[in-house]
Image (spheres, grey):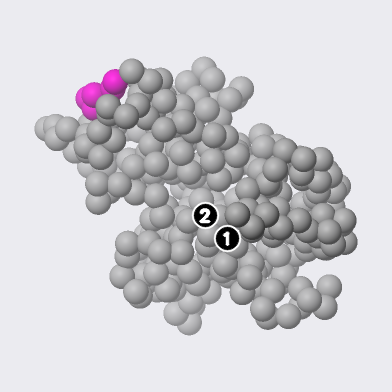
Amino acid sequence: MRLLADPRARDQLHRFHAMWLGYRAIPQTADLIAAFNLETTKLIDRVVFDQPASYLTLFTSPDTYLTDTLADQYGLPKPPGGQGWVSYGGGGRAGILSHGSVLAAFSKFSDTSPTQRGIFVQTRFLCNTIQPPPANVNVDQPPPATASACKLDRLRRAPRVGELRILPRNLDPIGLGLGELRHRRVATARTTTVTPSARSPGWESSLATAPSADPAELGQKLVESGQLAQCFVQHVMRYAVGRTTRPEEDAAVEALATSFKASSYSLPELLLGYVASDRFALRQEDPVP
């Protein structure tokens, strides 16, 4: 526990999350990036160190740490004194999936990309493998322009080739969930109501067919799936050993996941369990070519 009390432990934990969630380098101004990073690191520190709670609270927290700049960005009340904790107040926001750092990390065509965000959720939170598109498909071609200001309309008109007719159905609905707040604002401007209540039949049984839920509901569904905690342990293990885990390490990952659940998802307990394991003491290096 003395090592976790060292300020460098926080730095390493921040670094891990920035790598895992992909926000080490995002296309925003320096001031906004600093504000995004402050918001995210404050939530990590709160859940893990300052007010220790289940690590899964990171995805369901009803509060976030804002500066005046971020309050204006999100349309939330400004915190007293220029920065501090503010309640999301509902409205579809909760946890780290509502943070600008995470939402800005996976975009395309100078805009948000539901497919990229769907890949992000499937690979980073569920540890699913997404096969690349066919070689004859130009994935850098943006959706065609239409008279509609709604991204959903543009995506429906985008061409689909071969496997891509199937692939986006497993990705776009999830990715659209992370942009639902934005779609609502566009829809309101068009005097059309868009709500997260119109759900596809597969929502309760599979995240792969999830409809356009908002970030709060998507975070809750990830927590309830059980896959998020298991996948998180796998990413921690990868970060610790500095490479992709091997099949012979599956048992070690499973053991850590079991103890993580038994500790009510305490991240400090997970880290202590890892360093106390034979996997840490007898780490194997890759052979030198």
Residue 17 drawn above or below residue 123: below
* Residue 142 percent coordinates (x, y): 22, 38
For the point 48% across and 76% down, the residue is 83
Q: Indicate the secondary structure of the residue bearing disc 2.
A: loop
Check disc 2 and give the amino acid type: Leu
Any mark on residue 109, and which?
A: none
Answer with left or right where residue 190 lies relative to residue 182.
Answer: left
Nearer to us in this view, 268 or 211: 268
Q: Main secondary structure of the magenta part?
A: loop
Q: What stretch is highlighted in magenta?
A: 157-161
Label 2: how many Cα within 10 Å (few below 14, some 14–19, many 20+):
many
Q: Is residue 171 magenta?
A: no
Say which residue label 1 marks.
17
Give the alpha-carbon distance from disc 1 to disc 2, as whole Å. Answer: 6 Å
Q: Return the x and y of residue 175 as percentages of the image width and height.
A: 42, 38
Crowd class of label 1 (few under 14; some 14 to 19; many from 20; radius 10 Å): some
- Mark 1: secondary structure: helix
Does the CB distance between marks 1 and 2 fall below 8 Å? yes
Question: Is residue 13 rendered to the left or right of residue 64?
Answer: right
